[in-house]
Image: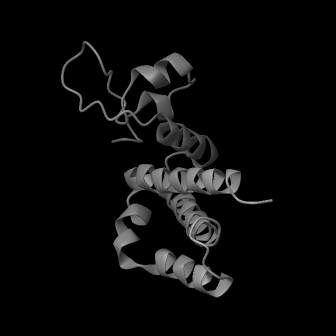
Amino acid sequence: VGVSKNPNVIGDSLSFAELMRRDFWGLPMHGSGWTNKSFRPLTTLTFRWNYLLHGLNSCGFHATNILMHCLTSLVVGRTATVALGMSGSWAALASAFFGVHPVHTENVLYLVCRADILACLLGLLAINAYAASFSPP
């Protein structure tokens, strides 16, 4: 439903105003009945890009989630090195454990859990940027 019935994802055109006006499920956030107000415009935008590339074929959406999870796993290793000061081998181990841990199954397999992958990725990138700004030259 977050993809197949969301006008921001499957519509003929996308406007920034509509992206900001609708929730994650494509429902208007104000004035038209019930909505849970789950505002995730970046996730909706990535769904739109997937839709433009693959239509409603779920293989493209799943491949994107897998690639994003792999990227997030690599960033976990980088964060372990930059922010926590781990050696390369320990950071690689942390990255591998993050990548294969079964707790992430739902986030990778369910299309709508892309928001969790993006939140983790952007949070880790923010930590890396913060740690890099305070590291000695």
Figure quadrant of residue 124: bottom right
Task: Give the residue drawn at x 48%, y 56%.
Answer: 120
Q: Nearer the viewer, residue 88 or 95?
A: 88
- The image position of residue 52, as x and y in percent, is 61, 40
The reply, left or right, for residue 131 in relation to residue 108 is right
Figure quadrant of residue 7: top left
Q: Nearer the viewer, residue 117 or 111?
A: 117
Figure quadrant of residue 71: bottom right
- The image position of residue 102, as x and y in percent, is 37, 78
Q: Nearer the viewer, residue 66 or 134?
A: 134
Task: Give the residue drawn at x 61%, y 51%.
Answer: 130
- The image position of residue 95, as x and y in percent, is 56, 76
Q: Is residue 62 above or below residue 101?
A: above
Count of numbered labels shown in the rendering: 0
In the picture as drawn, the residue positioned furthest to the front comes out as 136
In the picture as drawn, the residue positioned furthest to the left comes out as 34
- The image position of residue 29, as x and y in percent, is 31, 22
Task: Give the residue drawn at x 63%, y 56%.
Answer: 131
The reply, left or right, for residue 128 in relation to residue 39 is right
In the picture as drawn, the residue positioned furthest to the top comes out as 31
What's the coloring here?
Answer: one colour
Q: Quadrant of the C terminus?
A: bottom right
The reply, left or right, for residue 95 in relation to residue 7 is right
Task: Give the residue drawn at x 29%, y 30%.
Answer: 37
Q: Quadrant of the N terminus?
A: top left
